[in-house]
Image (cartoon, rainbow, N blue to C red):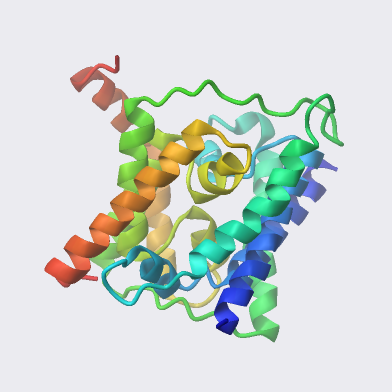
Amino acid sequence: MRSIFAFVAGGLFGLGLAISGMTDTTKVQGWLDVFGAWDPTLAFVMGGAIIPMAIAWLLTPNRTPLLGGSFPEKSAPKLGRNLVLGSFLFGAGWALAGLCPGPAMASLTFGHMGNIVFVIAMLAGMVVAPKFKSALDTAVPAE
Amino acid sequence: MPIEWIYGLIGGFIIGTAGAVFLLANGRIMGASGIIGGLVDGTGRGNAAERIAFLAGLIVLPFILVQFWDRSETHVSENWAVLIAAGLLVGIGTRIANGCTSGHGVCGISRLSLRGIVATVFYILAGGLTMVVFRHLLGVI
């Protein structure tokens, strides 16, 4: 049952990404290109997504998930180096290709070699990330 | 209002609904990089089936959609060096930051998570700077 709901959620996510145009790298790069031909589509997507998600969060207190377990705790507001540096690296890659993990997976079957190359590199990055992180911790210990 | 903005709003609403389903049914945060990364580095072995099912939906449903409505143009770069550098940065960065546009952005901002908001500010800032340097100064993308 968990897998069925996960498939439905993943499927809706993919449909939403394709319908919203977030699988089109020009829209993502256009949003980030403030000094070029700026494209505000991404703001509409974010706004549209936050509404149902915020309602979902409002339903969570004093309840449990439909399929059991418990809702994820709100993490302590720890704004360490990893959050900032990691987000910075991610943002740079996001702009270079116009792809982030969700849309990269959603457009994997769209028949473009570039999408496949990106996903392979992204998976490789995820494989080395733990090593990268521990090397970073050794070189510059976190506070 | 351009039609693409309306598609953006509708698609965004569907994305948020997906996140709501994953949260309210499975009790999980819908973060693409976390779902994929946990499979890649083995930290998500305990609930691998759920992760694989999510990714199957994420890949299969858009494939079906584009058979009926051609939204398959991605305008993705043909420069492999750029794509490989970008993919590595996205893979490493999202795992170090523990989230991407879906986890920190959609799911984090909607519960007013400070971490999600800070991450979003930094990845948009980095993205904007990257466009300035690599498009307007160097002309590589």
Residue B133, compared with residue A41, is above or below; it is: above
Can you tell which quarter of the image residue B93 is in?
top left
Percent x, y of residue B32:
56, 48
Give whichever of A122, B15 is nearer the camera.
Answer: B15
Tell me the quarter of the picture where residue A8 sits.
bottom right
Picture coordinates of residue B54 (x, y %)? 68, 50
Q: Position of residue B131 (x, y in %)?
A: 26, 63
What residue occupies the far front of the structure in this picture? B1
Callout count: 0
Front-lying residue, B26 or B84: B26
Q: Identify the residue at image location x=35%, y=30%.
A: A82
Can residue A30 be seen in the rendering of this structure?
Answer: yes
**Residue B112 screen position, x and y as percent:** 58, 36
Residue lying farthest to the left in this orientation = B138
Q: Does residue B68 sit above or below B5 in this rendering?
A: below
Q: Quadrant of residue A133?
A: top left
Q: Quadrant of the N terminus of chain B?
A: bottom right
- Residue toward you, A92 or B92: A92
Q: In this picture, is A8 found above or below A36?
A: above
